[in-house]
Image: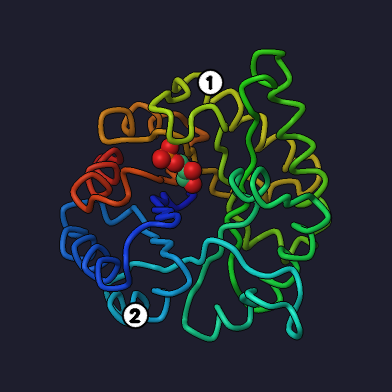
Amino acid sequence: MRRKIVAGNWKMNTTPVEGVELAKAVAAGKGEVCPCVDFIVAPPFTHLSEVVKATRGTGIAVSAQNCADEAKGAYTGEVSAAMIASLGVEYVILGHSERRQYYGETSATLNKKMALALANGLRPIYCVGENLAEREAGKHLDVVTAQIEEVVYNLTPEQFANVIVAYEPVWAIGTGKTATAEQAQEIHAHIREVLRKKFGAAAEQTPILYGGSCKPSNAAELFAKPDVDGGLIGGASLVAADFLAIGKGFAK
Ligand code: 13P
């Protein structure tokens, strides 16, 4: 059985003090949610250390939102995978569409980031997803196939065992427009098939999360689909009650 995961990508929101409060509120309400759900919170770099301390012993794991594509050295403003891991952070989001779109991340960059994350014991949450034009042209399956083949296919089976995939259609992120449960299932099943081609039965264990305007009102329907193993939540993860309510999309 695959674990169920509800992860909150806080993006560039909250101060460190607000972040600690938010993480504590999630921890306080976690008991109301099925123990089958693993919660992850992904604060900005500046709060990682404090949020790790605030969530210690609560069962809530912490993720970074990015890491550098070099190990160390003269890369002003960058934060390495080793630095992140040294704080007790367990996950790192890589290849988010906002990073691909606004910061020019390519498969070449992401191959380096994935290797560094895994070498430092971080579990990557690797994001894929098509934009609106690609969806309207019927190319969504091809787009995510390429995003998987160009990066995930370069991993060894041992590395692959630590990867989580997040499908986030760009047209659904922050727009209030959610993929239907059927659209999500179609593409999640396709992603698993692409993973199976390279990694065989190990693909059955890979959590594939849905992201894009996921909220309490649509989580249960999305999560009911067999290949939707949870969510990567943006806006709704900034309100503890909403984030927890999304977790309740998995029946207790
Ligand atoms: P929203 O939930 O705000 O649409 O963001 C989704 C997302 O990008 C999570 O990484």
Give the answer, above or below, for where 40 lies relative to 216: below
Residue 67: which quarter of the image?
bottom right
Q: Which residue is mark 1?
A: 183
Q: Who's the residue at 63% across and 75% down the image?
A: 77
Q: Which mark is residue 23?
A: none
Q: Who's the residue at 57% across and 55% down the image?
A: 125
Q: SS class of the residue under badge 1?
A: helix
Give the answer, above or below, for where 170 lies relative to 34: above
For the view shown, which residue lies furthest in the top direction?
137
Amino acid type, mark 1: Gln
Sequence-first disc among 2 and 1:
2
Give the answer, above or below, for where 54 lies relative to 39: below
Left or right, 61 with reference to 121:
left
Left or right, 246 with reference to 68:
left
Q: Who's the residue at 82% across and 46% down the image?
A: 150
Q: Percent x, y for residue 80?
A: 65, 77
Give the answer, above or below, for where 124 lies relative to 217: below
